[in-house]
Image (spheres, rainbow, N blue to C red):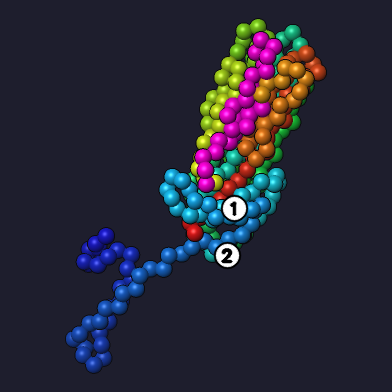
Amino acid sequence: MIGFNGGLIGINRTYGATAASPGVWTLDETLPTKRKVVASGGNSKEEITDPVDGFIYILHSFTSTGDTSFIVAQGGVVEYLIIGGGSGGSGGVAFVNYGNGGSAGVARTGNTTVAAQTYTVTVGDGSAGTPGEAASDAGGNSVALGITATGGNGAPATGHTGASNADYAGGTNSTGFNSGGGAGAGANGSSSTGGAGFTSTFTGSSVVRGGGGGAVSSAVGQPGGTGGGGAGNADGTSFNGTDNTGSGGGGGRGDGSFTGGTGGSGVVFIRYRK
């Protein structure tokens, strides 16, 4: 790109007069040095190629719940994908309604500039499914680089509506005892199934994460949302959200002994150009 002085923007230019010929000016040009991030930390560190932009990235994956460190030796621009923990499904109330599906945690993606320092990375855990008349707790928040991806809201025990999250709503099904599917990280829950998850090529291939938990409709367990959502529990088996996807757990059948599934733990990914 041409600058106002006829030079290329981004080139460092230094002008000075020579001692031997005071009326003659010299020009020194140096290209700017491209600064690359140097960092460590996470449960794994690998090279990946994004199939969309074709660039090679260094990818740090944080999959253990709780706090770990991302240690930056040389700062620069990094990209992130952060997903909060999913909430568990509720068990439902006998002769009132079947259990509602749990919600996925929200997904946050973007880029930011990091400095040479140590950053704390938190991966949120999924909350437990509940039996009977108890609503489930919210999933844990995932936090990295000053960005928070909140966990899914708890699934209500009554009301025929699946759990929501900060971005999407749970589905409602008030016909008979039927319950609603939980919100996904990429879509609302439906009247029975969990909402779809968030699709990304961040880790080198197209992957869906963060499906909402399925509900129970006509005494049949309904599917969880794509991306790891747990199915509704109609036969006494808990269908959990998949760990490291932030997915919601499925709802229970509602006779007091059918527990909703547990929400899946969240995940944090950080990458930068090689």
Q: Which of 13 and 264 lies nearest the eye of the viewer? A: 264
- The N terminus lies in which quarter of the figure? bottom left
Residue 237 placement, left or right of 230 = right
Please say if the residues under marks 2 and 1 sit with CB atoms less than 8 Å apart.
no
Where residue 169 sits in the image (x, y, percent)? Answer: 56, 24
Q: Residue at x 46, y 64 (%)?
A: 35
Q: Residues within 10 Å of mark 2 (few under 14, many from 20)?
A: some
**Type of amino acid at the residue the image marks with label 1:** His
| Image disc number at residue 73 | 2
Where residue 50 sits in the image (x, y, percent)? Answer: 48, 48
Residue 28 placement, left or right of 259 = left
* Mark 2 residue element: strand
Q: Which residue is mark 1?
A: 60
> 112 above or below 16?
above
Q: Earlier in the sequence, mark 2 or mark 1?
A: 1
- Write the start and end of the magenta stretch as one range: 204-230
CA separation, marks 2 and 1? 14 Å
* Mark 1 residue element: strand
Q: Which of 5 and 70 lies nearest the eye of the viewer? A: 70
Q: Is residue 253 located in the magenta-colored stretch of the structure?
A: no
